[in-house]
Image: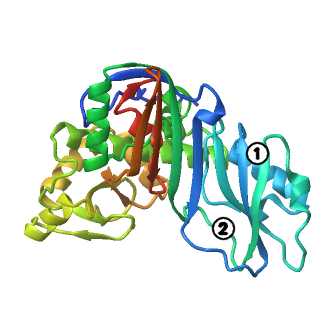
Amino acid sequence: MTINTQTIEIPVWPYVYGQPSGFGKIRSIPEDFIVKENLAFEPSGAGEHAFLQIEKTGENTDYVARQLARFANVRQRDVSYAGLKDRHAVTTQWFSVWLPGKADPDWSQFETDTMKVLHAVRHARKLKRGVLSGNHFTLTVRDWQGDKDKTIQQLEGIKANGMANYYGSQRFGNEGQNVNKALAMFAGAKVGREQRSLYLSAARSYLFNQILACRVTRKNWNQPLAGDTYQFDLSHSCFKSELPDAEIIRRLEIRDIHPTGALWGKGDAGVSADTLDLEQGIIDVYPELAQGLIACGVDKDRRALRVNVQDLQWQFVNDTTLKLDFTLPAGSYATSVLREIIEV
């Protein structure tokens, strides 16, 4: 069978705060990209699931999960985690291991030069994907050069007004090829279960970023449109408004709510009027992606177009190193902060 699809290249999506004003290197060493997960709840201390807070360096999440299953002598599906984290980083993550009727093994024996168990506690239910309140980042940009005053101005803008909630480049795979692999899959190419999930996510994320890019270009990514659906800050709860009133405008100004964009799939659009026209115009450009997601049974959802960058701090250490410290809600990308201030 010949599979003939269009080819999609990942563009440079428009910036909110102007062209990046500096250049630099990230991830020169894993310690330059430090991430710590914040759980959305406190483990109870009792139950069949061992919750482990693990610091890993230069290891991907699936690898650690497989090693935990082998060490605890359980099935791989009995090990869970809240989210995937970058391999080329120092990350502190939570994992759970189902141990019904079993005592904890000596977790210290699990440790290696690249994996360290920081904390172990029991809980009644397994750890589910996405149950994080956010992630804390400590980033170091080396060999930085550029316009320091403009960079500080851009950082102040991000701190005061938030950032465009683009999916980061890692969402799209090496050189963005996961979107094209999604197109091939929709056209009939056979893929494994894990790859299928990655390709579906890449396709949805690409369409979302295109919608967000359109609103950034039109300067209404953080402004109300007729027919918008809004999401509460630090929440997945949404509400729709046919026409923005004074209260919606006030809450947008204080960044208590955010406009949303479509995560494409089957189901009701969730928006109307001007917002529906804008989103449908983007979707119509990519019928293979849109129809493929629907055919695969993916449900439509909404994602905030704007995200607040909490506790953002920065420091220039000499003239060639920039350190950043901030917290983002789960699902938002540190690379989307970096892209506004440096070209990597």
Along the line of sight, the residue nearer the viewer: 135 or 140: 140
Identity, as a three-letter code, of the amino acid under mark 1? Tyr
* Residue at 41% from the left image edge and 26% from the top image edge: 9
Q: Which residue is mark 2?
A: 127
Q: Is residue 16 left or right of residue 133?
A: left
Identity, as a three-letter code, of the amino acid under mark 2? Leu
Upstream in sequence: badge 2 or badge 1:
1
- The answer to whether one can see residue 230 in this image is yes
Viewport quadrant of the N terminus: top right
Tell me which corner region of the image, top left, top right, bottom left or bottom right, holds residue 315: top left
In terms of secondary structure, where does tag 2 sit? loop
Tell me which corner region of the image, top left, top right, bottom left or bottom right, holds residue 13: top left
Label disc, if present, on residue 63 of the rendered structure: 1
The x and y percentages for residue 173 are: 55, 34
* Residue at 19% from the left image edge and 65% from the top image edge: 251
Along the line of sight, the residue nearer the viewer: 142 or 233: 142
In terms of secondary structure, where does tag 1 sit? helix
Tell me which corner region of the image, top left, top right, bottom left or bottom right, holds residue 53: bottom right
Image marks 2 and 1: residues in contact by CB distance under 8 Å: no
| CA distance for labels 2 and 1 | 17 Å
The x and y percentages for residue 296 are: 50, 54
Task: Decide: few, some or many residues near mark 1? Use Cα within 10 Å; few <14, some 14-19, many ≥20.
Answer: few
Q: Is residue 117 left or right of residue 86?
A: right
Q: Is residue 197 left or right of residue 333?
A: right
